[in-house]
Image (tube, rainbow, N blue to C red):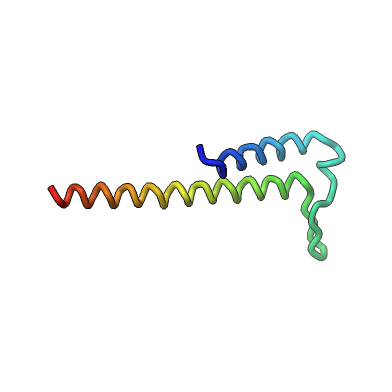
Amino acid sequence: MRWTWRLAMALWVAAVLSFFVPGAADASAVELGDIRFNVSQVITLLAVGFAWGDLRQWRSASEKRLEKIEKKLEEL
């Protein structure tokens, strides 16, 4: 596994655990005017972002591998 996927899983576990910690569940992490994000929401968003980044890297790498395979098949 890549480091981005491991980080996404670790952040997701931290987000789930933070739901059960009374101080962290209600603590405001980011405030943008009237919009507030608590700690667990921010951690969850970071986890989703790293998971999405890992998926994009995996897809890019698999497309490159498929192109190499197609070129070799065309040469035959």
Q: Is 16 positioned to the left or the right of 67 in the image?
A: right
In percent of width and height, residue 42 lies at: 72, 50
Give the vertical position of 35 relative to 47 (above or below).
Answer: below
Residue at 52% over, 41% down: 2
**Based on the displayed image, in which of its 4 quarters is residue 25 positioned?**
top right
Give 26 or 4, whichever is nearer the viewer: 4
Residue at 84% over, 45% down: 26
The residue at the far bottom in this view is 33
Residue at 82% over, 35% down: 21
- Tag count: 0
Give 19 or 72, whichever is nearer the viewer: 72
Residue at 54% over, 49% down: 52
In percent of width and height, residue 9 lies at: 61, 38
In percent of width and height, residue 10 lies at: 65, 37
The residue at the far left in this view is 76
